[in-house]
Amino acid sequence: MAAKPFASSADLAEKTETLEILADGVYALTAEGDPNVGAIEGEDFLVAFEARATPVAAREWLDRLREHTGKPVRYLVLSHYHAVRVLGASAFDADVIITHENTRKLIAERGKQDWDSEYGRMPRLFKEPQSIPGLTWPDVTFSDRLAIDLGGDRGELVLQYCGRGHTAGDIVAWLPRQRVLFAGDLVEAQAAPYTGDAFHTDWSTGTLDRVKAFEAEVLVGGRGVVPRGRDAVDAAIEQTRNFLKVMLDKVGAVHARGGTLKEAFHATHEALAPQYGRWPIFEHCLPFDVQRLWDEFDGIDWPRIWTADRDREVWNQLQGA
């Protein structure tokens, strides 16, 4: 069997982008499994959610958004730190960039290494990488909850930390009046979760329980389609939870019996592929997912830093011929 192309390095075809109006003044842009982004109108300003990988890529999203509103971006909310989510921030010219306090820690600890890692894994998302001015730093961080008054009769946007999950610093954005939840990569709807910097047990239990407790009617996940209606929203949450639980079961069993990382990868791949295998970035994510969970079973609580070299080493070990 020939080795698979590294991560998403061979995924060079352009994706069809779809701008969806989820409620009055609430927008999401999806793109066939590429990272989703969103925006919420305040009375005289915008809150943007996620920033894309480069300013050039971010401006393409803003051009679509400007077909609907010309309000300036006052707040840019970044759900967590991964390079493809944040390095386009300068395009928004936001007054305030907001993250969780743990996200600031991650930027300080691993910002450049993650940038190099993700550029190698997903080169197509980095449109004109020379346009990136440097690492994206928040202006405001918080630990638990932060509310933004949208003005007029628009209500508020609640930014909430639900616990450790996809990273140590994921936050969601909740619109109580519209019952729309921007969940970031804590939930994927018909896309494979990336768990290379995750806390699998926390995520699959209390964190997703808190996400589900919002009882959202519309959910924008990190990738994939936008579920509408409580049943569809809950199904997306449970699909994500099931992915994590299967990983915990299969990797945990191999680890407990003294097996190898490669055996754990193959057992997990065999168990997940029937349901998730055709979803976006499944083959890309799984080696890094399994390695991180293996580390957790080894007692490594805080995720090790991914570098371009470490990416290739793990990939060649698990997805090689």
Image: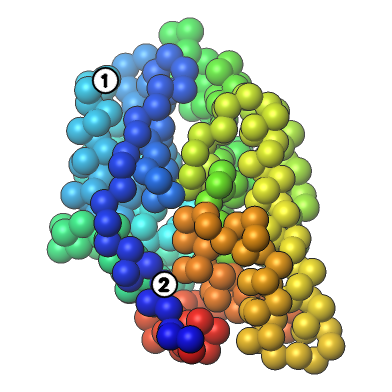
Image quadrant of residue 39?
Answer: top left
In the image, taking residue 60 as reference, residue 27 lies left or right, namely right
Q: Position of residue 159 (x, y in %)?
A: 55, 36
Who comes first in sequence, dot 2 or dot 1?
A: 2
Cα gap from disc 2 to disc 1, whole angstroms: 36 Å
Q: Position of residue 20 (x, y in %)?
A: 40, 27
Q: Which residue is mark 2?
A: 7
Q: Which residue is mark 1?
A: 69
In the image, taking residue 285 as reference, residue 57 lies left or right, namely left
Image quadrant of residue 40?
Answer: top left
Secondary structure beneath dot 1 equals loop
Q: Residue furthest front?
A: 1
Q: Position of residue 216 (x, y in %)?
A: 64, 28
Q: Please state which of residues 114 and 35 is positioned toward the viewer in this rendering.
A: 35
Q: Please state which of residues 160 and 23 is positioned toward the viewer in this rendering.
A: 23
What residue lies at 44% left-to-right and 8% top-to-bottom? 152
Mark 2 crowdedness (10 Å alpha carbons): few <14, some 14-19, many ≥20: many
Residue 271 in view, yes or no: yes
Mark 1 crowdedness (10 Å alpha carbons): few <14, some 14-19, many ≥20: some
- Is 290 located above or below residue 241 in the figure? below
What residue lies at 43% left-to-right and 84% top-to-bottom? 3
- Is 167 located above or below residue 33 in the figure? below
Residue 50 in view, yes or no: no
